[in-house]
Amino acid sequence: MNQSEKKCTQIVEAAIAEFLERGFLGASMDRISDHANVSKRTVYNHFESKEILFSKISDQLAERVLSKISISYNPDASIRDELLRLGWAQGELALDPDMMRMARMVLGEATRDKDFVWVMSHKMSFEKSITAFFAAAAEHNQLNIEDPYEAGEQFCGMIKSRAFYPQLFGSPLATREDLMRYVEDAVEMFLARYGVVDGKASAVSAA
C-alpha cells in the first residue's frame, strides 16, 4: 500500500466513525480530516464532497457483501454441503467488526433518506444469485421447490435473524461456533421442509 492509498484508508475509517456518531447530516469533513490525521485538502483530493465520500463507503460495503454471497450451485456436491456453504457465506458477514460498523452507518442514513434505500437495495441486490442457486438445486432434483426466490428468502432469513440483524442493532458479534450452530440449524430445518429423499419430497414438503 503506497502513501496515497494509506491516507485514503485513514480517511475512510475516520469517516465511518464520524458518520456512525453523528449521522450523514451532522458529519463534518473537518472532523474527518482531524481524526484521519490528514489535511482537509488531502481529504478533498481523495473525495470531492461528503456525499461522494459516503457513497464510496456504501459502494465498498456493497462490494464486500456481494463478493461474499455470490455463490453458484455445485451439482457435484451434496445438497447439505451446498446449503452449509451458502449459509456460512451469508452469516460470515456478521463476524466482521468492520463490516458491521459499515452496515450500521448505512442503516443510519437509510432511515433518513428513502431514495438512499432504493439506491443501496440495487447496489446490494443479490437475489438473482440466491434465486439461481435454489433454482439449480431444484432442477437437479435436490430440493422440492416451486418458488426459488421465496425459498432463498426463507433460508437467508433464518440465518440473518440470528447472525446479522441482532448484531446490526448492537448485540455482541456472533462467534464462529455460534454461527456454525445457526447455519446447521437453518440447513436442517430447510431440508425438513424442502428436502428430497430417494427422489421423493420430504414428509413435511409433501404435506
Image (cartoon, rainbow, N blue to C red):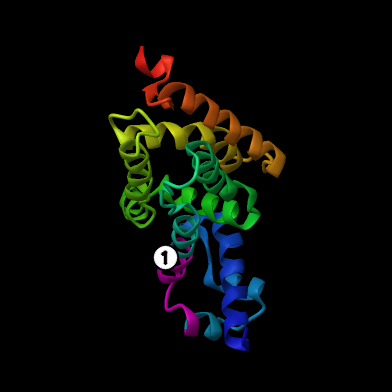
Against 61, residue 46 (above or below) is below
Closer to the camera in the image, 147 or 44 = 147
Mark 1 nearby-residue class (10 Å; few <14, some 14–19, many ≥20): some
Residue reaching furthest to the top: 207
Quarter that holds the C terminus:
top left
Against 120, residue 153 (above or below) is above
Closer to the camera in the image, 120 or 127 = 127
Against 16, residue 155 (above or below) is above
Q: Is residue 140 visible?
A: yes
Query: Which of the 4 image quadrants contains residue 11?
Result: bottom right
In terms of secondary structure, where does tag 1 sit?
A: helix
Residue 133 is situated, as x and y percent measured from the top left of the image, at 38, 45
Please indicate whether residue 121 sits to the left or right of residue 81 in the image.
left
In percent of the image, x 28 and y 29: which residue is there? 146
Q: Which residues are magenta?
A: 45-58
Please indicate whether residue 147 sits to the left or right of residue 13 in the image.
left
Query: Which of the 4 image quadrants contains residue 48?
Result: bottom left
In percent of the image, x 65 and y 53: which residue is there? 97
Residue reaching furthest to the front: 198
- 153 drawn magenta: no
Quarter that holds the N terminus:
bottom right
Closer to the camera in the image, 92 or 191 = 191
Against 6, residue 111 (above or below) is above
Residue 73 is situated, as x and y percent measured from the top left of the image, at 41, 48
In percent of the image, x 41 and y 67: which residue is there? 51
Residue 126 is situated, as x and y percent measured from the top left of the image, at 37, 50
Going by the numbered disc 1, the residue's amino acid type is Ser
Kindly identify which residue carries mark 1. Answer: 55
Prevailing secondary structure of the magenta residues = helix
